[in-house]
Image: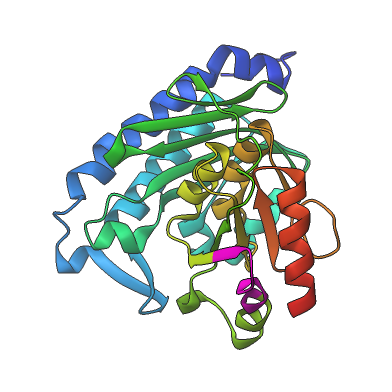
Amino acid sequence: MIEETETIEEFLARCSADVEEAVRKAAAAEILPRFRRLAAHEVDQKSGPHDLVTDADRLAELRLTEDLGALLPGSVVVGEEAVHADPAVYRAIQDDVPVWIVDPVDGTRQFVHGDDGFCTLVALVRRGTVIASWTYAAARDQFATAVRGQGAHLDGERLFAGPPAPGRDLVVATSHPDFTTDEQKHALRSLWTEGIAPRACGSAGLEYLAVARGELDAVAFSWEAAWDHAAGLLLVEEAGGTHLTLTGEPFRVTGGNALPFTAARDAATARRVADLLRTGS
């Protein structure tokens, strides 16, 4: 619980471990018991056959909403499933109060198919700025955290993305074709060029983690949903990377971005990918 005169930074210094524990408990109670054990009635479609939701998504989000709200009274939780039920919930990101942005199972399609490439994403945002983030790949037992100005860490080890090795193609994970419009496909197709090795992305949260670890050079995404991006963008920033929209500005979790956008392990890579995306838009 935040003290009456306590800043968000002081709250994090005192309670960041409690947030991590809440994420771990939600995954242990609602996600991992259903991994590779989902019954047909526990899986539904949202907008179409590629947009899935499970009981694990819903129940983990409900638990996180309760636990995170209790840790920081006066805060608001904006979760993917709550927004699906009531799109007006998303507007809270614009408010002055602290906001928890939650994606209970990022990579639901992978989760449904028994692939361990999914994670739980939590970010704490204030006035449009991501202050801290938690990324938990429960099936891989990997936990990444970031606090603005204090670095990014994976299982306690500091992350440094570093520049790509010279002389090789840049590997860029892009929005999956199943989730892109024809116009977006055209923009992303500009990455199919010499010196770039594009591939379809999996879980956005895990792709951001790969960039922060220096295992992936960049991502190029065509959608704005804050629960997919907030946690990972801070990881990349705190590991030394950066992100750019088509106008050359950083991505804003509050929306209104020129898309597609990129996040990359260093500034030079971000500029190169953004320049290519601009030519295709």
Q: Left of 136 or right of it: where is 123?
A: right
Instruction: In the rendered view, tell whether residue 141 sits above or below residue 11.
Output: below
Instruction: In the rendered view, tell whether residue 197 sits above or below residue 150.
Output: below
Q: Is residue 132 magenta?
A: no
Q: Left of 20 or right of it: where is 44?
A: left
Q: Which residues are magenta?
A: 188-197
| Residue 177 placement (x, y as % from top left) | 49, 77
Instruction: Between residue 98 and residue 270, name the one nearer to us.
Output: 270
Instruction: Between residue 197 and residue 145, name the one nearer to us.
Output: 197
* Residue 149 lies in quadrant: top right
| Residue 273 placement (x, y as % from top left) | 71, 61
Q: Left of 255 or right of it: where is 34?
A: left
* Residue 232 lies in quadrant: top right
| Residue 178 placement (x, y as % from top left) | 45, 78
Q: Left of 116 or right of it: where is 158?
A: right
Instruction: Between residue 17 and residue 197, name the one nearer to us.
Output: 197
**Which quadrant does the N terminus fall into?**
top right
**Which quadrant does the C terminus fall into?**
bottom right
Taking the spot 74% from the left edge, 69% from the top edge, the residue there is 276
Taking the spot 58% from the left edge, 58% from the top edge, the residue there is 169
Q: In the rendered image, is residue 87 in sight? A: yes
| Residue 279 placement (x, y as % from top left) | 79, 76
Q: Residue furthest bottom?
A: 182
Q: Is residue 190 magenta?
A: yes
* Residue 193 lies in quadrant: bottom right
Taking the spot 36% from the left edge, 59% from the top edge, the residue there is 108
Q: In the rendered image, is residue 281 in sight? A: no
Instruction: In the rendered view, tell whether residue 246 sits above or below residue 218.
Output: below
Q: Residue furthest front?
A: 167
